[in-house]
C-alpha cells in the first residue's frame, strides 16, 4: 500500500491533506511535535475508514529525522512526502530575534531539506515530494522578512531538485498558498481576522486537484 508522509500532520492543512489522501488509497503517516494533536488527527482519519500511523518528530532535530528514517518505514512503500510543518514570527525586522531566525530556518527550510535527504533512498522514480511553501516564497512582504527568507530557501531547494531529478528521480512540486484559517495564527496579531481566509480543507482540495500534473501550484489566500 502506498504511503504518504505528512509533517505538521496533527492539525490544519496537514490533517486535511491526510484525510483526503486516505480516501485516495494512501496509508497516511503523520509526523509532528504534539502527540495529542497527532492522536486526534489519526482518529479522524480512522473514523472515515483510512489507514494511519503517527509518531512524534521535531523537524528541527536532525537526530529525530535520522531515527525516523532508520526505524519507521521498513514496511511502507513511500509514494508521497509532504513538507507541511512550518512556523512564522512576524514584525519589523529591527525587532526580530536570533531565536526567531533560527526557529524559522530550522523548521521551514533545514528540516525539509534534511528529511528529504534522509528519505531519498526510499523515494523512487514515480514518487512525489510536495513542498508546502506559502506565497511568502514568491514575493517579499512587509514585516515578514525572516519568514520570507526561510520560504525562499525552500523554494530554491525545490526548484533545484526539479532540475536535478528530472527524468531520474521523484517529482518535486512547490505549492504556494496564502494564509489560511488555522491555529498558525493563534499566538500572532499579524492577521487581524483569519476567518476571512480560505479553510485548510479548501486549500487541501485545491492542492490535491493539481499536484499530479503541475510542478508549481499557487493559491491566494482570499476566499
Image (spheres, rainbow, N blue to C red):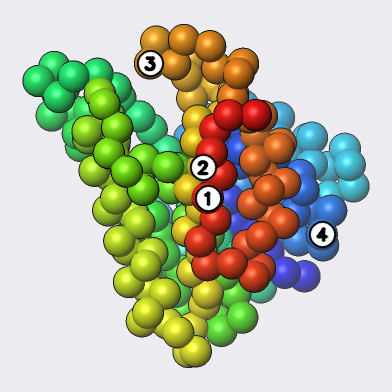
Q: What element carries label 2?
A: strand
Question: Gap between marks 2 and 1, in whole Å?
Answer: 6 Å
> Which numbered disc, 2 or 1, marks the residue that appears first in the sequence?
2
Q: Which numbered tag is attached to residue 218?
A: 1
Report if the CB atoms under discs 2 and 1 are less than 8 Å apart: yes
Looking at the image, can residue 56 be seen? no
Mark 3 or mark 2: whose residue is earlier in sequence: 2
Label 3, residues with CA under 10 Å away: few <14, some 14-19, many ≥20: few
The residue wearing badge 2 is 177
Q: Distance between the residues labelled 2 and 4?
A: 22 Å
Identify the residue shown where x is 30% and y is 61%.
156
Mark 3 — residue? 190
Spatial CA distance of label 4 from label 1 is 22 Å
Residue mark closest to the camera, 4 vs 1: 1
Report which residue position mark 4 lands on.
24
State the residue at coordinates (48%, 14%).
186
Decide which of 48, 183 is in the foreground and name it. Answer: 183
Front disc: 2 or 4: 2
Amino acid at each position: 500500500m502506498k504511503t504518504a508522509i505528512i509533517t505538521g500532520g496533527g492539525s490544519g492543512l496537514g490533517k486535511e491533506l491526510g484525510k483526503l489522501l486516505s480516501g485516495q488509497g494512501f496509508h497516511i503517516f503523520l509526523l509532528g511535535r504534539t502527540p495529542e494533536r497527532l492522536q486526534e488527527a489519526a482518529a479522524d482519519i480512522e473514523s472515515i475508514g483510512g489507514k494511519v500511523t503517527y509518531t512524534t518528530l521535531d523537524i528541527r532535530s536532525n537526530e529525530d529525522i535520522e531515527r525516523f528514517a532508520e526505524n519507521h518505514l521498513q514496511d511502507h512503500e513511500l509514494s508521497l512526502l509532504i513538507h507541511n510543518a512550518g512556523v512564522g514570527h512576524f514584525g519589523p525586522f529591527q525587532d526580530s530575534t536570533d531565536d526567531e531566525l533560527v526557529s524559522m530556518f530550522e523548521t521551514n527550510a533545514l528540516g525539509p531539506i534534511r528529511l528529504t535527504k534522509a528519505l531519498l533512498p526510499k523515494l523512487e522514480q514515480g514518487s512525489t515530494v510536495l513542498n508546502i511553501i506559502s506565497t511568502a516564497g514568491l514575493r517579499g512582504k512587509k514585516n515578514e522578512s525572516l519568514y520570507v527568507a526561510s520560504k525562499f530557501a525552500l523554494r530554491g531547494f525545490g526548484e533545484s531538485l526539479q532540475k536535478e531529478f528530472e527524468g531520474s528521480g521523484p517529482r518535486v512540486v512547490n505549492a504556494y498558498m496564502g494564509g489560511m484559517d488555522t491555529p498558525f495564527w493563534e499566538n500572532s496579531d499579524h492577521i487581524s481576522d483569519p476567518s476571512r481566509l480560505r479553510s485548510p480543507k479548501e486549500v487541501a482540495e485545491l492542492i490535491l486537484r493539481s499536484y499530479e500534473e503541475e510542478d508549481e501550484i499557487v493559491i491566494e489566500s482570499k476566499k
